[in-house]
Image (tube, grey):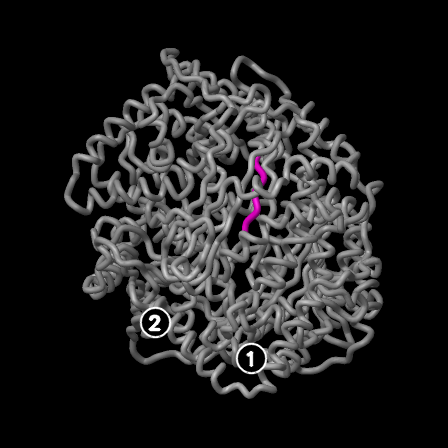
Amino acid sequence: MDMIKDRDINGLCEGQRIGGYIVKKTASLPEIRGEYYALEHESTGARHVHIACDDSENTFAVGFKTVPADETGVAHILEHTALCGSARYPVRDPFFSMIKRSLNTFMNAFTASDWTMYPFATQNRKDFYNLLGVYLDAAFFPKLDVLSFRQEGHRLEFDEEGILQRMGVVYNEMKGAMSSPSQIMGRGLLKALYPNVTYGHNSGGDPAFIPELTHEDLLAFHSRHYHPSNAWFFTYGNMPLKDHLAVIEKEVLSRFTRLDPKTDVPSQPRWESPRKIRETYPAIAGPHLERECQAALAWLTPDILDTRSVLGFVLLEQILLGNAGAPLRKALMDSGLGTAICDGAGFDGDNRDTAFCCGMKGMAEADAAALETLIMDTLKALAEKGIERELAEAAIHQLEFQKKEISNSPYPYGLKMIMGMAGTWFHGGDPLKVIQFEEDLEAIRSELDRGYFENLIRHYLLENPHRVLYILAPDTEKQRLMDEKERRELDALAASLQEEEKKRILEEAEILKNLQEAEEDLSVLPTLDREDIDPGIRIVDPLEQQGSLMCYDAATSGIVYVNLAFGLAGLEPEKEALVPLFSHVLTRMGTKKMDYVAVARRVDACTGGIGAMGHARTRMDDGRLSPFITLSAKALERNLSPMLELLEDFTVSYDFSDTERLKKLLFEYRAAMESAVVQSGHRLAISLASRNLSPGCALSEEWGGVHQLRRIKEITDQIKAGKDDILNRLQNDFRDMAEKIFTGNNLRAALVSEKDIRDGARKGLETLQGNLGSKGALTFTSSRSSEMSGEGIREAWTTATAVNFVASALDTPGMDHPDAPVLAVIAKLLRSAYLHREIREKGGAYGGFALFNAEEGVFAMASYRDPHIRRTLDVFASAADFLASGHFDERDINEAILQVCSEIDRPDTPSAAARKAFMRNLAGLSDGARVRFKERLLQVNRNAVCEVASRIFVKDRILQGVAVITGEDILAKEEVNPPLVSHRI
């Protein structure tokens, strides 16, 4: 599309001045029916991009190029500390206070390798400007007092026994991060590839070096980096740009003059020969540990400003690694050298010098050289023999599909746009070229027959000496040695302290504790009121329903979405336990018509993805368990027929006979589950603690929790031991399951599309249902009722981690009970008014959570990357005392209601809203129940909270279910009473 020059767009044109800004570029964005504006503030040099479109989820972000020169985590700690009070809002934690005073759909802050960003999104105009004021003041005029630095960064404290400890939110967060092999791999690759520039430093902070950061260092870093001359502003949505600019200029830019922040990132000096680096990660002793290495080859690739080559590598990644039939992925998986693709594999296009990586996990270290040879030989063969045209076209199709599909998951769409353009923009490139890549794509297309991708491989991979063979090996002593080293250093420091120094540490701890507990006047912060809440909910009804097929009318930009759901009630228990594995392999195996390579290539060439997933829900209408599996698919209108053919292949022509393929998929599944333990430990702990409280929770734990990980480890360990009969049994079980599940009378389907393509899609689905046949006895509703044993759980599950994930759970009434909205309010109240202070600020954990699962009738509390166990359980138990004390008022209740409503009213794209409506229908969750819940929610007051809390939050019940994910050494030191039953993950 040609750039629009010298013409008015929505009131602005290039060269026009608006306040202190000059409009540098304008363009139309027809895909979203929007306009693009790039502006620069004349006196400070601040850049601003605005995307105007008819989207009510308005987004703001301000980013700074942050270039740390050491491992102290200064950029990360500054991100945290900046949100601990500012000149205009001098309260202890305005960021977290605003979460509860807002209807935001997103609030957070990010620290990347070379930038820091503060984004938010909301649908409410008043809320937008409330948040904008707080964000601007936090970023440009933070207090950055020493106590906040100690709380968020690092500090020394004496524990109850008088032993010196090191605390701090970021300190503990990074101890947890550096226990994760995937995090160690990712950060290790950066350090290996970029030893001479900022990317070689851990921007999050290495716990061994974080204590070296001083408060003075923090202030200096802010002064240099958080300046308008080093700032990039972004706004998106249907609110007027002129209003945004006026606020930003008045509140911030008018108070600064231009400077040179000296934050340009130079290119990494190139090597003359490849290198090899070996590092280790903390591991637990166990069988087959010698094959728990990761090894990867990584290269520096194009400069980020070479947008055409960067786009070429986005496509090349898809060609080489994007699916099971991709030639490099297939070569790796067929080699038998490892069990899954390594962490960090793929193209990283965010840094000044981009990078490409590929390798394997589940390897023997001795095979690293063979892996390097395999990768280089595979790339050489592709460069010499050529890449199949259909692979290139499939990669281009995936890129076009992603551009066409508008989604606000996992982030608001506006935020996804800024995240996509940030790297190019921050390094001086044109962000519009990232959004409008058609010119670069057409140039690539024109060179396909002249070996475009083959030349990329030759130039950047085969002939590029800036390459590293990176090996990450397990070390069962590493965590113990790190812990002992930290303990020795702290003991030596404690012994060297003078009495005056000890007194200062004790006094500072007491001052910080008093500050954390002090009542604050939060009236200085802006807020919304109940009157600002829309009392209604979004209801999406099917346009038509024919038998088991529901058709939804939605603006989908020419994309067709299909969801097939099949009931699982009635499966034998031993087969029900296999549903997650069945779901994982179903669409990744071959069929009777095609092998898995052809299937994978067909999916990429014709769809935006097809996947299967098991769901365990407790029905809202009768309390029964509703287990079902969904096949979800999406495709451009022109590919409707091949998408439906693929769905029929998976449900009619399934084939599980490829034993080698099945084996590889099982090991891939295990690797994915293992990597989630330290990353999502709080979720897994909640699942463990809740599993006896509802049938849905019980099955969810069996399907997606630690028990599922133990099941796949048991299966794969048997395979490693040469017991291949387990594979034959699985193949027979999967065939039997498919025969029982995929029947026409066990199908419910949803079609989401625009009306002009509905008839053809509906007929295709009716044909598919007819081909399934009608035999079978499975249903969507199990005989298992909501009455569970409620038997108390007190467990600790150990793995290789330097921090803890602690959870408690208790059973409560469900969504359609009058208590349910009050419990939702109590969850928000506990998190914001109690757990945040006790778990994060005082305890040093990364986060403390309270969650009410209204569908299952379960209330849970949890901590994330927590240095404590016993103390945290005491905090959970004392939640009853906090609620009984009544130390909260109607303002706190209003704020909690705002938080609940922000989740209820979170916007969905039309297609996502329709698909969610279909899933609610399957789970028996009626719109009437949703309406009643919100009506009751808006009536909740302090008296209702106190009354419900007095009945449900009895101190002895709060710890009805307790589960902790921790390390063996940590558990041995913690004196939890009564003791936790210990298991190894």
Q: Residue at x 37, y 40 (%)?
A: 707
> Vertically, is 955 above or below 758?
below
Residue pointed to by mark 2: 481
> Vertically, is 241 above or below 496?
above
| Chain part drawn in magenta | 858-862
Q: Position of residue 313 (x, y in %)?
A: 43, 59
What amino acid type is highlighted by mark number 2?
Leu
Nearer the camera: disc 1 or disc 2 = 2
> Vertically, is 369 above or below 574?
below
- The CA span between labels 1 and 2 is 23 Å
> Vertically, is 927 above or below 678?
above
Tell me, yes or no, whether the two marked residues, 1 and 2, touch with CB atoms within 8 Å.
no
Earlier-in-chain disc, 1 versus 2 = 1
In the image, which disc is placed on residue 294? none
Q: Is residue 246 visible?
A: yes
In the figure, is residue 834 to the left or right of 659?
right
Magenta segment, prevailing SS (helix, strand or loop): strand
Residue pointed to by mark 1: 213
In the figure, is residue 339 to the left or right of 523?
left
Q: Residue at x 53, y 31 (%)?
A: 561
Nearer to the camera, 161 or 484: 161
